[in-house]
Amino acid sequence: MPLLLTILGARPQFIKAAALTRAIAKKVDLGWSQSIIHTGQHYDAKLSDIFFEELNLPRPDFILRLQSSEREARMNEMKLGITSAINQCTPDAVLVYGDTDSTLAGAQAADELGIPIIHIEAGLRSFDLEMPEEVNRIATDKLSSILIAPTTTAMENLQNEGIFGAFLTGDIMHDNALYFTKEMQGLKSKSVLLTMHRPSNVDDLSRLESWIHSIGDWCMLHHVDAAFPVHPRTKKSLVALYGLVWSQVLLEKNIHAIDPVGYIELLRLIKTSSLVITDSGGIQKEAYSCKTPSVVIRRNTEWVELVNAGHTVLCHEPKELNDCADSQFGRNIDGHDALYGDGEAADDILRILTENLS
């Protein structure tokens, strides 16, 4: 029975793993089994445990307890832990998702031990090397044995870098959004979902304050409320900026701060909102899956298809927010362009692994 060692460490990876886990359970005749290592990158009950519970993911076989706060030291800790897990369970392949530090640490550990590497979401590019995620993507693709590309653009990116033989499957996160919202009821309301966690937006307090002012002013002008699940990193900056009354300051601008939510509740918020404002790679795509327009508060995006199709707009500066939000609020997205497949990417991935690794 072939064994996958799956590397997980951050919210989007937990979600992506749910789709492939369902496929493994459904396709028992293919004989795949899976061990999971949680790298500890997001080891917080509100960002981690809740996703395992509601997505019915198997509990991790290995959990790393990272001690360092410095990125390079944390990477080394993850590599050592993953290397130990590989030696203990001797998998047929190591599977990594996306572009986090956990992704690259897993790929590097497997490469050093000569274990085949499967990279799901291969070929995504923002062409911004100032983003750690972009560096992680490129390095992981170069190390990988089987590259699973979600879009034709991703395939072209790999080919332009001299990497051929990747497999086009559609997007596994789109699978999940369709799966979990197919029975979800609720009409669009005149409301906004706001998420913001990237260091480029929240670590610089003056920039964070500019975003809060711009988003809040737009909400008040249009008599719209924004739900804002606050990431721990963002909360730390908001406390530094406004003190203990930070949530009241936001509320005065129609921004309702709430605790981080689970995946199902997040999808419900996306599906029933008329606009999503986010700096998340995954949430801009989940907005598309839920037929909700979005504004991405970043200079660029790895999901360029959304911009090209008009389903999202990029907004790099707070002063641009008003026009960007006006252009997207309440906009109709039919979703029939099938940018990310038909919701069966996980089944296709499992078939590819069976044909190429078994």
Image (cartoon, rainbow, N blue to C red):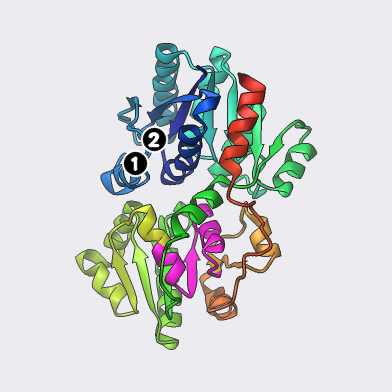
Which residue appears farthest toward the left when viewing the image?
244
Does residue 37 lie above or below 276 as drawn?
above
Q: Residue at x 21, y 69 (%)?
A: 245
Give the labeled residue for mark 2: 70
Q: Position of residue 292 (x, y in %)?
A: 53, 69
Q: Which amino acid does label 1 sit on?
A: Phe
Give the labeled residue for mark 1: 52
Q: Position of residue 313 (x, y in %)?
A: 61, 68
Q: Confirm whether residue 313 shows in the render.
A: yes
Left or right, residue 270 beside residue 250: right
Q: Residue at x 43, y 61 (%)?
A: 183
Task: Tell me the SS state at disc 2.
Answer: loop
Which of pointers 1 and 2 lies earlier in the amino acid sequence? Answer: 1
Q: Where is residue 265 in the image (x, y as percent from the top left)?
A: 35, 60
Does residue 349 lie above or below 177 as drawn?
above
Left or right, residue 252 beside residue 303: left
In the image, residue 283 lies in the stretch drawn in magenta: yes
**Which range is magenta?**
268-293
In the image, residue 118 lies in the stretch drawn in magenta: no
Task: Answer few, some or many: residues within 10 Å of disc 2's Cα (few below 14, many 20 plus, some between 14 and 19).
Answer: few
- Front of the two marks 1 and 2: 1
Left or right, residue 199 beside residue 146: left
Task: Answer few, some or many: residues within 10 Å of disc 1's Cα (few below 14, many 20 plus, some between 14 and 19).
Answer: many
Q: Confirm whether residue 206 shows in the render.
A: no
In space, the residues marked 1 and 2 are separated at their CA atoms by 26 Å
Q: Which of 248 and 155 is in front in this view?
A: 155
